[in-house]
Image (spheres, helix red, strand yellow):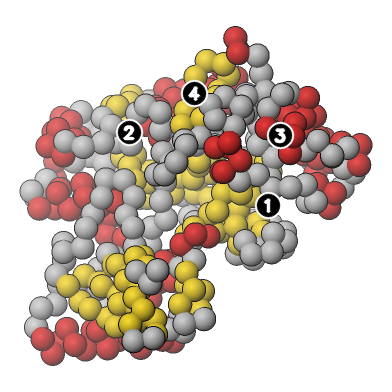
Amino acid sequence: MISDILEQIKIQIKRVKTANGFYSQKLKDINIEDIKEFSDFEQLPFSEKDNLREAYPLGLSVVPEERIVRIHSSSGTTGTPVIVPYTQKDVDDWALLFKRCYEIAGVSPLDRIHITPGYGLWTAGIGFQLGAEKLGAMTIPMGPGNTNKQLNFMIDLKSTVLCATSSYALLLAEEISRRGLHDKIHLKKGIIGSERWGEKMRERIATELGVELYDIYGLTEIYGPGIAINCTHHTGMHYFNDFLYIEVIDPKTGKVLPEGQTGELVITTLKKDAAPLIRYRTHDLSRIIPSNSPCPCGRPYPRIDVILGRTDDMIKVKGVNIFPAQFDSVLKKIKDVSSEYQIMIDHLEGKDTVTLFFETPVAEHSMLKRIEADVKIQCKSDIGISVNPKGVAIGELPRSEKKTTRIFDNRY
Ligand code: ZN
């Protein structure tokens, strides 16, 4: 199996080297015959999103134009977007992977799948759609926004599966609570993708919607969402090692880390047709769950852990590396605190200060002060930094339909 993967990787390297794309330059000094072991493969250069940007518009393609049936584009917030071309095989493979995800989450052709991520250049909505159609379930292709219509359709069409980002799922959950619609909705499962989210937020969405939640992983550069998902045992996300080779590296040194250690996911595609990627740095933080503790479901697919954050979210404050997931786990431990929080980092009077805003239903002054004190102590003991805790009312911190920014670094 392992040698099969290496052979598959070598076939892909040969394809990208011979095509006149950006990898032909990047790997021009690499002799494929020299790649005999994974340790040889691990010497190959990484590719970065910036490399893909340089290939704009269609430099990523390694197939003749007549075979390209579609492009997608990552929603880059700044600068040149990344354009990813797909052949029909890529579209079919993606649908297959996504169908597997639904099956792993226990979704069946009798389910009704309510899809709220956007359709279009972004890979999200259309990926959820493709996989659901391949599975044979009824889809309700809502796209984002228009909460009234979302809720009406959810009730009238008896949607059983909600596909959403975590922040949009939370927004819908809160609306359902506020309007007292619990008895009218039929949701059983939520498939939540595209951003890291904490345990407390998960609990709130699960409780308020009355559903079982599944994390789905993916990125536009590599098909889109649908390359990994957790099963009903919730022991991490199974990923499809017949399509992807995943390494975990130390984001600072680039060194490959052993199973179980947390670092940055680096992905090599094994079967991608139009735009194969070799050692692509995702900047997502996670780990490969050790193979000696297999998932009780018995599936052959290995697992990655939940996404802990982005390597760019890692911020150095007072000499300590911090990232948002740590604050999630701190707040989870404290009673009467919601999952929503925001961190402001400032540089005042010559030193870094960290203000942690969190939501709490408690308004009474002395009780609020006590909760703030608990948050402060817990941050110090778990993360190793001192914060100024500020409790605010539930609903005061912003929710978003797309991604929620948690850390604001105002020092520079
Ligand atoms: Zn499993």
Q: Could you say which is closer to the camera, residue 383 or residue 333?
A: 383
The residue tagged 3 is 23
> Disc 1 to disc 3, how far (Cα)?
19 Å
Amino acid on which the number 3 mark rests in the picture: Tyr
Task: Give the SS element for disc 3.
Answer: helix
Amino acid on which the number 4 mark rests in the picture: Ile
Question: Ligand 1 closer than 8 Å to the CB at disc 4?
Answer: no
Q: Tell me how many marks there are.
A: 4
> Disc 3 to disc 4, how far (Cα)?
19 Å
The residue tagged 1 is 247
* Circle on res. 71: 4
Task: Give the SS element for disc 4.
Answer: strand
At horizontal 16% and vertical 36% (from top left) the residue drawn is: 146
Q: Position of residue 287 (x, y in %)?
A: 60, 59
Q: Position of residue 123 (x, y in %)?
A: 44, 32
Residues packed near mark 2 inside 10 Å, few (<14), some (14 to 19) or many (20 plus): some
Mark closer to the chain start, 4 or 2? 4
At horizontal 30% and vertical 75% (from top left) the residue drawn is: 356
Task: Give the SS element for disc 2.
Answer: loop
From this view, report whether residue 171 is shown above or below residue 271: below
> Disc 1 to disc 4, how far (Cα)?
26 Å
Amino acid on which the number 1 mark rests in the picture: Glu
Q: Quadrant of the N terminus?
A: top right
Q: Give the quarter of the image for residue 260.
A: bottom right
The residue tagged 2 is 118
Front tag of 3 and 2? 3
Front tag of 4 and 2? 4
